[in-house]
Image (spheres, rainbow, N blue to C red):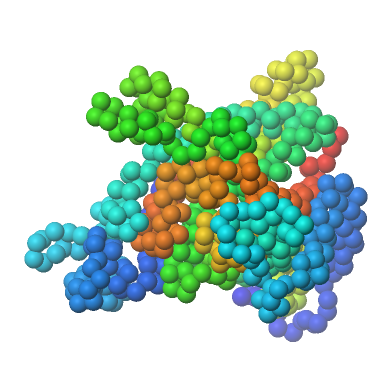
Amino acid sequence: MWRYIVRRLLILPILLFGVSILIFSMLQLLSPYERASLYVSDISKNPGAIDAIVRKYGLDDPVWLQYWHWLVGQRDPVTGQVAGGVLRGDLGFSKTGKQAVVKVIAQHFPATVELVLWSSVPMIFVGIQLGVLAALHQNKWIDQLVRLVAIIGYSIPIFVFGLLVLMVFYAQLDWFPAGRLSDWASRVVLSPEFHPYTGLNTLDGLLNLRFDVFVDALRHIVLPAVTLAYLNGALILRVTRTSMLEVLRQDYVTTARSKGLSEGAVISRHAQPNAMIPVATIGGLLLIGFLNGAVITETVFNYRGMGWFFADAALHLDVVAVLGFALFNATLLVLGNLVVDVMYAWFDPRVRLA
Amino acid sequence: MNTTVAPALPARQEIETPRSRSWIGAWKVAKRLLTNPASLLGVLLILMFAGVAIAAPILAPPANARQPYLIPRDGFAPEPRPPSLKHPFGTSEGQYDIYYGVIWGTRTAFQVGLIITGCTAVIGLLVGSIAGFYGGWLDEILMRVVEIFIAFPFLMAAITMAAVLQSKIGRGLTVSMIALIAFGWTTYARLIRGDILSVKQRDYVLAARAIGVRDLRIIVRHVLPNAIYPTLVVASMDVGTYVISFAGLSFLGLGAEVGYADWGQLISFARNWIPTLSRHWYIVVYPGVAILLFVLSWNLLGDAFRDILDPRMRRPR
């Protein structure tokens, strides 16, 4: 077990190095002038001033030197202040966010976490139950229905589903609004009496005992959460069904049945726990699904989280911000995958030996 | 590479491979695809879309024959207009004819899906074959490169790449297709590599090696034909997936130009009319249904394909 974890940890720096090289190469496609916003917040239109910045930060230096500066930052010879440096947590300045990319990420990250939490927890539960249900009734009408729901789930683009949902529940019925909070609720959240402990509006609403804020935040999060959940849940449903079908054919299930155990006990104690092992492998895939899905879902619902900002920055060709976000998300995904793999190895000893 | 080769063997002699049998297999697969109701529906839908794509100039005659992919406009009024005799599916924001966009968008969808899938498959095939067949440090390096590309969430990576390329060369179909290809090939590289690793040890490949058949010939004639079916399953599903991803880029404003006959671009007009969507439903529903059915057809085909090729998925006992 420990050898496996150590091996995975040793690959980690290589992987992150590769990721940084890839991001840096994309940055190199930009002109030195565009890259100036890696170090400076407001770039004047004056050509002389821009040239001075390019010289000061060595934006026309040899590539390897620029890479080094991009990683660790540069010290201003006059003021002694260090600017830039990805390893220092400085990803440059965003022209759409009008501040440092890291600040923009910090600002929008809680909203996305909140959305993913409200979406993934019910989704995992419902997806697994439906998958098991379908497998137990293989080729019956209930299985066909569940499969139809699933196949539509991964055939419909997230924005089409989102717009249809908005059409019915917002434009027609007016049950759930778009956005993240109503105006009055955002004023409450931004007021000094309200402590933003976590940045998750629903949770903060509860912690501040402002249940009206909680309800308002929840009403805004329902539609995007359902959208994200449906499209990712289709995957978890399919994997659960396949895996359950396979497990039901194993000898130990037959043995359990021939011992005279009730069908319920066979399913819940012998079959289902084993069928969950392959489902755990798609943890990484789900994380990707949520990160990708958040970009479009948040844009459709005007829910201002990381994905919304990312799409907005990309549309306005704010490349430094886009690459900063990409680097952040790739790191998040690499670490997330590591956690998933280690957990998987923990549950299933066969993985460690491979 | 061929260390086991004795120099004076009759290399011309053909080795018995399951290749001749694989054609019979292909016939059987085709027959089962056409008898399964789900995949039959998929095949029929694909044929229907292909028919629409081919007949596009008849179904929706272009106003300007030189640029048929530009959706004709009926005035410039911002508010969408409901379906009428002149515009069967209504007009979108800026009076773009939705019917025309849906019909010609079929061609765009085929282009985008097939070209991206084709390119990613070829790149993945090359990388995967080389890595799987030669193994060793080459395999090690190539697989690390694959892992680096996989470290990025696919759509985000494609959006990033599209934004970078667009800031250099401007908006267009090609730019976003390149972005999707750049991060899409890794699936195939991994898949083919795995297949080759398992096929490589089979007797007929070892035999071919023993009589001194060249590496390339072994890969092309003996290894790939036997690793092709799993790739086909993924490829048929990928056509749909790439059409969705591309539509996503277009929707965000990073794909086809404004006014280009592309379903995602057409739907992106709806972003400004969300509060009144119950009145302007046609700007989402028509292109939305088109894209859903198109992707669904490829997924039905891929799903059935996989069930046929994976004997474990048949009825128990």
Q: How many marks?
A: 0
Across and down, in percent, residue B116 comes to: 64, 66
Most foreground residue, B294 or B21:
B294
Considering only vertical position in the picture, is B295 above or below A283?
Answer: below
Residue A17 visible somewhere in the drawing: no
> Residue B248 lies in what quarter of the image?
bottom right
- In the picture as drawn, the residue positioned furthest to the bottom comes out as B8
Q: Quadrant of the C terminus of chain B?
A: top right
Most foreground residue, A292 or B81:
B81
Across and down, in percent, residue B117 comes to: 66, 64
Residue A53 visible somewhere in the drawing: yes
Considering only vertical position in the picture, is A48 above or below A2?
Answer: below
Most foreground residue, B176 or A74:
B176
The residue drawn where x is 48% and y is 33% is A220
Q: Quadrant of the N terminus of chain B?
A: bottom right
Across and down, in percent, residue B168 comes to: 43, 73
> Residue A26 lies in what quarter of the image?
bottom left
Considering only vertical position in the picture, is A334 above or below B256?
Answer: above
- In the picture as drawn, the residue positioned furthest to the left comes out as A78
> Residue A192 lies in what quarter of the image?
top left
Most foreground residue, A177 or B37:
A177
The residue drawn where x is 23% and y is 76% is A47
The residue drawn where x is 29% and y is 27% is A194
Report the side of A304 relative to B118 (left or right).
left
The residue drawn where x is 9% and y is 62% is A79
Considering only vertical position in the picture, is A188 above or below B81?
Answer: above
Across and down, in percent, residue B284 comes to: 64, 49
